[in-house]
Structures are given as structure tokens and as C-alpha cells.
Image (cartoon, rainbow, N blue to C red):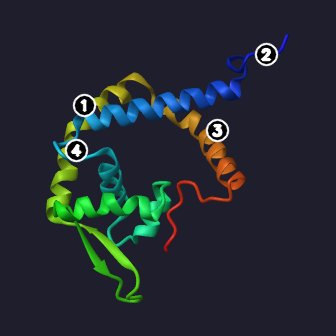
Amino acid sequence: MASEPEDHPDVQVFDEIRYIEHLVRTSIARKLPVGLTYPQFEAMNLLARRGDGITPLAIARALQTTKSGLTNTLQRLHARKLIQVENCQSDGRKKRIWLTPEGRAAYGQCMVAIRPRMDRLRDGFTQKEFRDVLPFLKALRTWLGEANDAPVGELREA
């Protein structure tokens, strides 16, 4: 008798990753200020963590989306005055993205709203548990990125 996909640990790992990703997105999306979407939060989070002045292409690569797919997200953030788009001084064809003071304030509100959930997460698991799982997850991400010839989770300058 052939084994069922659920019998394979590799299939189970990807199922768990998918469920975790869905639960994280849903949990964060429920705490965002009215009118702010999860993709917009992701872009703001990247700018806040990695620094301003990133190109749209670098943001798209880091978020694993296409540059054209990111365009709408950036336009909406710009319309709400949460980001500023500037021409690159060294290459006028490129754009650079910056969080505005309003964007930093909105991002701060997001972080305050999700902090209780993050605190509960940290209370539910030890730092050792998180550290122990990281090597496998990083190796899996790297392998998948190499298998697809795509930089996964890597911020490269565009």
C-alpha cells in the first residue's frame, strides 16, 4: 500500500509552515490601523528594520514579490503620506523609498498593537527553542532559493 502524503515528514513540514504563515498574517492584519493592509505593513516593516533608501526592486526581492506587484502597495503608502519616493542621486532612473515621520508613527502604532501577541509568543516558547529550529529553517530556505535560482529573503541592491 502506498503511503499517504500526510505520512511524509517533508509534506508535514510544509503544511506547518503554510499554517504558521497564515496565522501570522491573520494575527497581524487584525491589529493593523484601519486602511493599512498586511502587504503595506510588510513594506513598512522592511524599511524600518533594514533602513530607508531601499529601491523598489530590492524591496520586492526581499518580500518575494515582483516589482510590478509591489507598485500598488507603494503607491497606496505614498498616497497616505507614509512613504516618500525620491530619485536616486547616483542613478536618476532608480527610485529610493523612505519612511516619512507619519510612516514611522504608523509603523510604531502597528508594533504597539502586535506587541502583546509577541510577548505571549515569547512566554510560550524559550529562546533556545527558537534558536534550535533556525538552522533547519535557514537551510531549507537556502535550498529552496537555490533550487529556484531565486534569492530568498536576501536584500540585494537593485
Sequence-first disc among 4 and 2: 2
Image quarter of residue 104: bottom left
**Residue 56: x %, y % from top left:** 40, 68
What residue did someone put label 1 on?
Answer: 116
- Left or right of 141? Residue 153 is left
Q: Nearer the viewer, residue 134 or 23?
A: 23
Sequence-first disc among 3 and 2: 2
Task: Look at the numbered discs 3 and 2 and tell me whether their residues touch, using CB distance below 8 Å.
Answer: no
Q: Nearer the viewer, mark 4 or mark 2?
A: 2
The residue carrying pointer 4 sits among few (fewer than 14), some (14 to 19) or many (20 or more) residues within 10 Å by Cα, namely: many
**Residue 130: x %, y % from top left:** 50, 34
Sequence-first disc among 3 and 4: 4
From where the camera sits, is residue 48 visible?
A: no
Identify the residue at image location x=30%, y=49%: 41
- Left or right of 25? Residue 2 is right
Measure the C-alpha gap from mark 4 to mark 2: 45 Å
Q: Nearer the viewer, mark 2 or mark 1?
A: 2
Measure the C-alpha gap from mark 3 to mark 2: 25 Å
Q: Nearer the viewer, mark 1 or mark 4?
A: 4
Measure the C-alpha gap from mark 3 to mark 1: 28 Å
The residue carrying pointer 1 sits among few (fewer than 14), some (14 to 19) or many (20 or more) residues within 10 Å by Cα, namely: few
Q: Looking at numbered disc 2 in the image, what kind of residue is underneath it?
A: Ser
The residue carrying pointer 2 sits among few (fewer than 14), some (14 to 19) or many (20 or more) residues within 10 Å by Cα, namely: few
Q: Nearer the viewer, residue 155 or 11?
A: 11
User: Helix, strand, or loop for circle 1?
Assistant: helix
What residue did someone put label 4 on?
Answer: 110
Task: Look at the numbered discs 3 and 4 and tell me whether their residues touch, using CB distance below 8 Å.
Answer: no
Identify the residue at image location x=57%, y=54%: 152
Q: Nearer the viewer, mark 3 or mark 4?
A: 4
**Residue 120: x %, y % from top left:** 32, 26
Measure the C-alpha gap from mark 3 to mark 4: 30 Å
